[in-house]
Amino acid sequence: MTIHPQLDIPETIAAGPGPGNTDARVLARFAGAGLADHMHPAVLRGMVQCKEMLRTVMGTKNIHTFGVAGTGWSGLDVMFSAVMPGDTVVMFVNGTFSGIDGLTVCMKAATADELAANPMDPQPASVTIVNVPHGQSVTGEVVEKALAEHKPKWAAMAHWETGSGRVNDIKGFSDACEKHGAMGLVDAVSSLGVEDFRIDDYPGVHGWASCPQKGICCLPLTYAPVSFTDRYIAELKKTGTRTFVHHPVMEARHWGIIDGKDSPTGTYHRTHSAYAVAAFHEALRITLQQTVAQRAKDYTFHEAALREAVTAMGCEVTSNMTSLIVLNLPYDMAGREMELVQYCRAQNFGIWPTLSEPVQVRIGILNLLSQQAIEDIVARFGKAMRDHGAEFNQAAVDAALDRHYGRAIAAE
Ligand SMILES: *Cc1c(COP(=O)(O)O)cnc(C)c1O
């Protein structure tokens, strides 16, 4: 028998697409929660308050707005639980994550025979996958054309595709869903808490799912925010779904959403963790104190600085998200992306490659919203580039940052 030594995990800079850097206040609440059980009044009160704050963060009056224990995929599994075998679905895919959403949709929509025919990668006749090339956004026109042709029950898309760093046209998607009578389902894992938007402004979308660890900055495994319209819930009540734990109506009960109404306290669904509730509660408080609008502005401002600096190093940025840049290395370094990323990661500078072809470098700024943090990322990335033989004009990089942050340019 081996008892391993205590596990030490080093300090790292999470400068990737996610997870984001969790605020010290969130960690303090996590560690500071007493051992209250999941039916303790303080825990139940905390869950009801989380639900209320989450409605503000998401910009919604949807009663069915709550957190799903687990990661982003947990929330997405709840959202896609209303898709039943044989349902018609059009799924728009433009990168790794919408690709996995597409797999989830196929698993849910496959008939028993279709699932048995290809259990790990079912190909149901009722699902249409519309592929948009890596590096491009899903446009309103693409959605409009596909929904006009297929008239599906459901349409699904990622709001921000983190694999390629692309923002998809949520308004065009919502409009096309309304026009063609499809119920929209959106993976908002990367956009919630980063962009300033209100889900109620997109009436064609009936289900939304996000995650704890990106814009909400609450990694201590907590809650994936989800929200559903009354129409989604009515449809689900009609068809039912084959899950207890990820059932949107049953999971909502512990958050004090019972029979379609707010209730002063929740009822048992599963054993929620007081630590997770306390951490999630604090993360939502921080978001509302800073405001989603201010955070969105800060992301836009700092992303632009990072973009300018790496462009001055000769990289080509192909993304348009504000929490993440996805870039091609300078021409003479092409093919060395993985080597460079691994080199940075070995120094606890946690940048990422793309997870599907083509190989690109991803650098994220989740909760790294300060001049100092951005300058640190630029310095580390620049050094890694030089250590790999890149030649660029450091003065041009410094000048880009100086210009951006409005400092006096030192006399040359
Ligand atoms: C990160 C991400 C996911 C997966 O979230 P997990 O927390 O890893 O489960 C899904 N979709 C998108 C768009 C993402 O960015």
Image (cartoon, grey):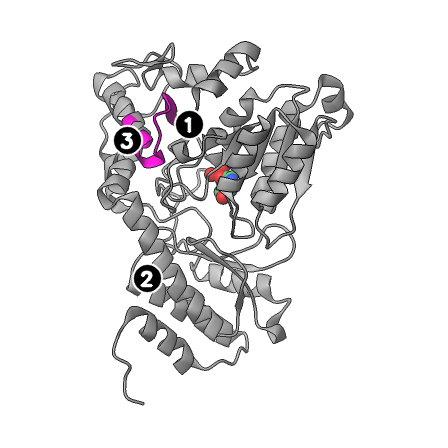
Span highlighted in magenta in the image: 52-67
Which amino acid, by three-letter code, is at mark 3? Answer: Met
Tag 3 near tag 2, CB within 8 Å: no
3 or 2: mark nearer the eye: 3
As drawn, the label of residue 227 is 1
Quadrant for the C terminus in the image: bottom left
Where is residue 43 shown, x and y percent of the image? 26, 22
Left or right, 393 with respect to 368, comes to right
Marks 3 & 1, CB-CB < 8 Å contact = no
Picture quadrant where residue 108 is located = top right
User: 10 Å neighbourhood of mark 2: few (<14), some, or many (≥20)?
Assistant: some
Specify the farthest residue to the right: 117
Distance in Å between CA atoms under marks 3 and 2: 28 Å
Residue 397 is labelled as none
Few, some or many residues within 10 Å of mark 1 (<14, 14–19, 20+)? many
Indicate the quadrant where residue 6 lies: top left
- Residue 136, image x, y percentages: 59, 53
- Whichever of labels 3 and 1 marks the residue nearer the N terminus, that label is 3
Residue that numbered label 2 is attached to: 373
Callout 3: few (<14), some (14-19), or many (20+) C-alpha neighbours within 10 Å?
some
Compared to 123, does 269 lie above or below? Answer: above
Please name the amino acid that badge 1 sits on.
Ser
Q: Residue 252: where, in percent of width, then height?
A: 39, 18
Q: Nearer the viewer, residue 110 or 3?
A: 110
Q: Which residue is the site of mark 3?
A: 53
> Secondary structure beneath disc 3?
helix
